Image (cartoon, grey):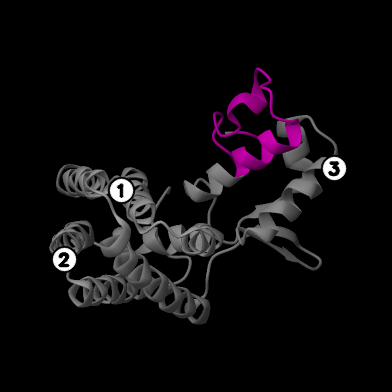
Amino acid sequence: MSPAGLPADVLGPVGGRRIAAPLREQITDALRRAILEFRFAPEQRLVERELMEVTGVSRATIREVLRSLEGEGLVRIVPQRGAVVDVPGPAEAAELYEVRATLESLAARRFIVHASPADHAALAASHHAFAEAARDRPDDILDLLRAKDVFYAALLDGAGSSTIRTLLGQLQARIRLLRARSLSQPGRPAESAAELAELVTALAAGDAAAAGAVCERHIDNAASSGRTVGAGESEVGR
């Protein structure tokens, strides 16, 4: 473990060879990845001095990185304490699920209108990959998250709305943390795969009402599952 409590590989190229991107961007990307892969505990302090030791950069650079992550909703700056890993509380989680249900239902309706046969094929293939992960590796939450990211990317590609993509992208970090809570519940990966299978079927049939209803039910079930874990109580990455 590093002085900041990070696994030795968490900084990737920052801890070894340099790549073309500016160093600040490398460090931002590495810490973002560490948070999204749950290598930090909820509310864990990100101590500037320790991060400086790990990265070899100045305090000013570390502060820029933390401010950037604060803007993404991954870090919260607490007076007299500094930066901590942020986790949505119950009220915010409820709002995020509500907004997500609205946007994803709209994306599903647009998919029916705008998606090409190639888009339908990509969505079906991405669902197959997620269902396979849910069946064979239900405890590998990070693998499930990556597979589900691919599924939603295919849905948005077919929907063809840059506005929906942008809005969901702004919420993605917070949504991914909530998604991990839900998928960590026993049986939830298989349930999620079954729900998404219904969505793929509804989209293939051009049934906008059924697709919207499946989206809302899927997110309602995810919210219920996530609430049983509670804020900050997911076992992911422990």
Q: Which residues are magenta?
A: 2-31
| Label whose residue precedes the other's in the sequence (1 or 2) | 1
Taking depth in this image into account, of 79 and 13 the one nearest to the observer is 13
Residue 23 lies in quadrant: top right
Q: Which residue is mark 2?
A: 202
| Label whose residue precedes the other's in the sequence (2 or 3) | 3
Residue at (79%, 48%) from the top-left corner?
A: 64
Kind of residue at badge 3: Arg
CA–CA distance in space, label 1 to label 2: 23 Å
If the image is split into quadrants, where does the N terminus sit?
Answer: top right
Image position, residue 58 (x, y; %): 85, 37
Q: Which residue is mark 3?
A: 59
- Mark 1 residue element: helix
Image position, residue 89 (x, y; %): 52, 75
Numbered disc in front, either 2 or 3: 2
Q: Which residue is mark 1?
A: 144
Residue at (54%, 59%) from the top-left corner?
A: 166
Residue at (76%, 63%) from the top-left corner?
A: 81
Residue 18 lies in quadrant: top right
| Label whose residue precedes the other's in the sequence (1 or 3) | 3
